[in-house]
Amino acid sequence: MRLSLRLCIASVIVLTQLVHGALCWGKDGHYTVCKIAEGYFEEETVAAVKKLLPESAEGDLASVCSWPDEIKRFSEWDWTSALHYVNTPDYRCNYEYCRDCHDSHKQKDVCVTGAIFNYTKQLMTASDNLHTLVHSYNLTEALMFLSHYMGDIHQPLHTGFPGDLGGNTIILNWYHNQTNLHRVWDNMIIETALKTYYNSSLPLMIQSLEAKLTNRWSHKVQSWESCKHKQTACPNQYASESIKLACKYAYRNATPGTTLGDEYFLSRLPVLEKRLAQGGIRLAATLNRIFSAKPKLSSA
Ligand SMILES: [Zn+2]
């Protein structure tokens, strides 16, 4: 194996420090992903998560899933901004960890997939060596970061082109409001869906997705949960899916100055709903793999 390749693979495992930013799924998107995940936690995961959550969460992971967005504007957390996304080469429509996971200064592993590997490893290592390593990491933060970034990676434009900053510089109209393409996928499609179908109630939208998971998508859940090669976390797969969806659905017919309306909304909403559901299922599966094999953390 070539040394550079070996170093790159090693760097996937080692990890991480970081730099600057973009927007994310809005609060509603992150809340939805984490709420769906909670429904799929195994018993040990429920206990471990409860133990790690800050008091302010009152036992509800979903309530703190936007925390990484709230802190990144503060200078001491500036290093986390590049962890919310990964850029892939303009118009290439594919993703490769070693080529793409770096910040604007080319520092390796500084991107959303690197962050997911990193925080998974922190939680795994700490739960393996609870008494010696628990003070080396802030596991409460690790849990909140991991839960947030698992949501981000399922937003197609969080694996986007650097030339338009994942759609942030594509200024267009969403119905009668001027916005940018990234915000359309972070917020606007969800907001319009809430108003149109759910009487502006997020719990109703979540219930509808949960119902689809037990009906329409029930035969897919197992494959969504699984990672190849018995990995604990497999964010590279999710990033590859996201950039393909970004090219096929998000960027298509969304050039600067266009007005997006019913046609775009109705054809993209099913894509977005499925990504929210997949994000929830995969967050739960990852946390179950971290905690359920290691009940030490919940019982310590
Ligand atoms: Zn984010």
Image (cartoon, helix red, strand yellow):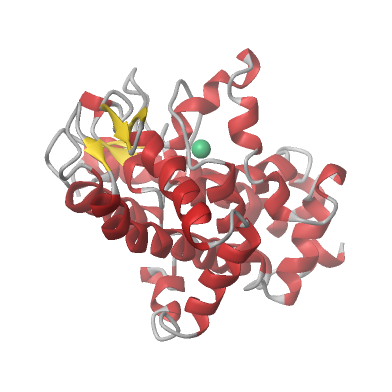
Out of 15 and 97, give the one closest to the viewer: 97
- Quadrant of the rendered structure where residue 222 is? bottom left
Q: Where is residue 215 drawn, in percent x and y? A: 47, 85
Q: Where is residue 170 drawn, in percent x and y? A: 25, 27
Q: Is residue 20 above or below residue 1?
A: above
Q: Is residue 7 above or below residue 221?
A: above
Q: Is residue 257 left or right of residue 234?
A: left
Q: Report the quarter where the C terminus lies.
A: bottom right
Total number of numbered discs in the rendering: 0
Q: Kindly identify the residue that appears in the image at 20 percent across and 38 percent down.
A: 254
Residue 70 appears in view:
yes
Q: Kindly identify the residue that appears in the image at 75 percent across and 67 percent down.
A: 46
Q: Residue furthest front?
A: 176
Q: Where is residue 75 drawn, in percent x and y? A: 61, 13
Q: Is residue 167 above or below residue 139?
A: above
Q: Is residue 253 left or right of residue 201?
A: left
Q: Kindly identify the residue that appears in the image at 54 percent across and 71 percent down.
A: 208
Out of 290 and 201, give the one closest to the viewer: 201
Q: Where is residue 286 drawn, in percent x and y? A: 55, 63
Q: Is residue 132 left or right of residue 227?
A: right
